[in-house]
Image (spheres, grey):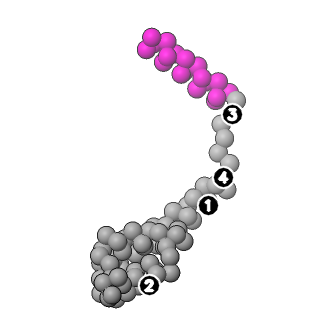
Amino acid sequence: MAHKFFINCDEATTICDKSQYKEASIFEIFQLKLHFLFCKVCTLYSKQNNFLSRLYKSKASSCKKQAICISSKEKEEIKKQLEQLKSEIS
């Protein structure tokens, strides 16, 4: 019976990733918290994973706010360069 509560490190990292995206069940989160009591490596993995995710989200949101567009002139230049490369390959 008790073996259902204990998970190995591979399962813990999988549940950690699922938990981060709100895909883990309550039982899986319980298993993960129990695993963290005994495994400091997985605890550290979870902290680092959460830190990196928050960092990515903050950078991604700031990038979305910036409107990065190229002008029509730049688009035409790129098209010409692609056509030139295409003709050189043929």
As for residue 13 lying within the magenta part, the answer is: no
Q: Amino acid at mark 1?
A: Ser
Locate residue 52: give its quadrant. bottom left
Q: Which residue is mark 3?
A: 71
Q: In terms of sequence position, does the residue under pointer 1 or pointer 3 come before the other?
A: 1
Residue 33 image position (x, y, % from top left)? 41, 85
Return the residue nearer the eye: 52 or 32: 32
Counting every numbered tag in the picture gives 4
Residues in magenta, as a range: 73-90
Q: Which residue is mark 4?
A: 66
Residue 9 image position (x, y, % from top left)? 30, 74
Separation of residues labelled 1 and 3 (CA atoms): 23 Å
Q: Nearer the viewer, mark 2 or mark 3?
A: 2
Separation of residues labelled 2 and 3 (CA atoms): 53 Å
As for residue 87 lying within the magenta part, the answer is: yes
Q: Are marks 1 and 4 in contact (CB under 8 Å)?
A: no
Q: In terms of sequence position, does the residue under pointer 2 or pointer 3 come before the other?
A: 2
Q: Which residue is mark 2?
A: 30
